[in-house]
């Protein structure tokens, strides 16, 4: 069970493996959107995304026997790179399954840590099947990108940092794909500051969390080709119940809104932001009237921008 105490334990366990990422502010965006914004810059984390947190916690919590056999995962890129980094950091083997439509930049990031990706079809069941095959062949321990207690707890450390960095927040907006970051954030915030409104942001082209919350069942994404490639996955069986219990609201954003949010964040934060990392800001921009006059934290979840997607982000 994911608890506040398990997230706090994770924060202590990984304190030397991750960056305490900064909060960025911008007066121009505050004035434009009519609220006080605090951007949690996980795009400045190791490997360029929040995924470094969950991977670090999972690897640090392996038994000696598990470490000897290495780790395996499937991921569109950010978790893959994060796990490859941690495996190299502690000197164990890593096996990474990636969808064939993963960005070239993210594929190369995995290779930079000495791991050659194993490619598969993008659907969640195909990812799972290939990873299970590799696990059977190698004896490696699965470190799932979101269906993992240790990974969810690691992701939740982001929210604990956020509470230490800014007072009197009214709302936090978090992107959702598999739901590890959102579930960890909800666990941290709703057990410490339950009055903070926590909202999720999801691409309309990958709206499975939205539809799952509406139907009460575990729904598949409508499609897998959103430019927010880090969110091209189905919400998890472990994460969805936490989300259903604690989430205050969820917003769907269009591909155009994601592209515009990516451009705006790159321009005003002077940092590199990938489309997945801009989804929360896209939701804030779309729903600005709901947050007028409030103090709002927006999670920039990643900065691994594939420059081959440049046509989407030209002004």
Image (cartoon, grey):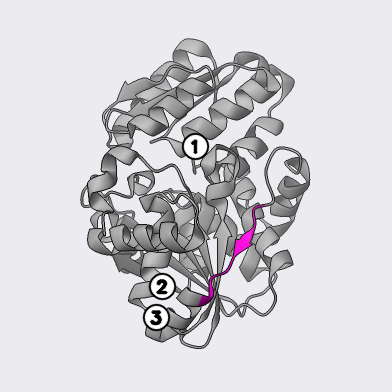
The residue carrying mark 3 is: 288
For mark 3, give the secondary structure.
Answer: helix
Task: Identify the residue at horizontal 57%, vertical 69% (top origin).
Answer: 25
The image position of residue 88, as x and y in percent, is 62, 21
Task: Identify the residue at horizontal 30%, vertical 25% (top origin).
Answer: 120
For the residue pair 223 and 294, the one nearer the viewer reads as 294
How far apart, in angstroms, are the residues tagged by discs 2 and 1?
25 Å
The image position of residue 266, as x and y in percent, is 43, 56
Task: Rate crowding at label 2 as few (under 14), some (14 to 19) or many (20 or more) other CA atoms within 10 Å.
Answer: many
Question: Is 300 above or below relative to 98?
Answer: below
The image quarter in which residue 65 lies: top right
- For the residues carrying marks 3 and 1, which lies nearer the camera in this image? 3
* Contact between labelled residues 2 and 3, with CB atoms less than 8 Å apart: yes
Task: Identify the residue at horizontal 73%, vertical 20% (top origin).
Answer: 64
The residue carrying mark 1 is: 79
* Contact between labelled residues 1 and 3, with CB atoms less than 8 Å apart: no
Question: Is 38 above or below relative to 2?
Answer: below
Residue located farthest toward the bottom when viewing the structure as drawn: 293
Residue 68 lies left or right of residue 263; in this view the side is right
For mark 2, give the secondary structure.
Answer: helix
Task: Identify the residue at horizontal 38%, vertical 36% (top origin).
Answer: 76
Is residue 73 located in the magenta-colored stretch of the structure? no
- For the residues carrying marks 2 and 1, which lies nearer the camera in this image? 2
How far apart, in angstroms, are the residues tagged by discs 3 and 2?
5 Å
Q: Which residues are magenta?
A: 21-27
Q: Count the marks: how many? A: 3
The image position of residue 57, as x and y in percent, is 66, 39
The residue carrying mark 2 is: 284
- The tag earlier along the polypeptide, 2 or 1, is 1
Residue 27 lies left or right of residue 250; in this view the side is right
How far apart, in angstroms, are the residues tagged by discs 3 and 1?
31 Å
């Amino acid at each position: 069970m994911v608890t506040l105490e398990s997230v706090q334990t994770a924060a202590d366990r990984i304190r030397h493996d991750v960056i305490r990422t900064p909060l960025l502010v911008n007066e121009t965006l505050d004035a434009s959107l009519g609220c006080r914004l605090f951007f949690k810059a996980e795009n400045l984390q190791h490997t360029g995304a929040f995924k470094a947190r969950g991977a670090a916690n999972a690897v640090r919590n392996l038994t000696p026997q598990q470490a000897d056999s290495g780790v395996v995962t499937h991921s569109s890129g950010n978790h893959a790179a994060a796990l490859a980094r941690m495996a190299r950091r502690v000197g164990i083997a890593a096996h990474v399954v990636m969808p064939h439509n993963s960005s070239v930049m993210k594929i190369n990031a995995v290779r930079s840590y000495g791991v050659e990706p194993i490619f598969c079809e993008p659907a969640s069941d195909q990812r799972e099947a290939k990873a299970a095959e590799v696990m059977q062949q190698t004896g490696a321990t699965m470190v799932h990108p979101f269906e993992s207690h240790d990974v969810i707890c690691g992701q939740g450390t982001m929210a604990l940092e956020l509470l230490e960095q800014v007072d009197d927040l009214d709302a936090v907006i978090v992107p959702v794909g598999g739901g590890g970051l959102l579930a960890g954030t909800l666990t941290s915030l709703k057990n410490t500051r339950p009055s903070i409104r926590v909202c999720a942001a999801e691409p309309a082209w990958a709206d499975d969390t939205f539809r799952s919350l509406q139907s009460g069942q575990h729904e598949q994404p409508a499609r897998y080709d959103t430019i927010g490639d880090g969110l091209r996955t189905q919400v998890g069986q472990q994460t969805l119940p936490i989300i259903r219990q604690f989430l205050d609201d969820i917003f769907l954003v269009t591909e155009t809104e994601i592209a515009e949010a990516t451009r705006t964040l790159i321009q005003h934060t002077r940092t590199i932001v990938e489309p997945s990392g801009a989804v929360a800001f896209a939701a804030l921009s779309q729903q600005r009237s709901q947050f007028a006059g409030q103090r709002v934290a927006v999670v920039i979840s990643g900065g691994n921008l594939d420059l081959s997607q440049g046509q989407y982000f030209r002004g």
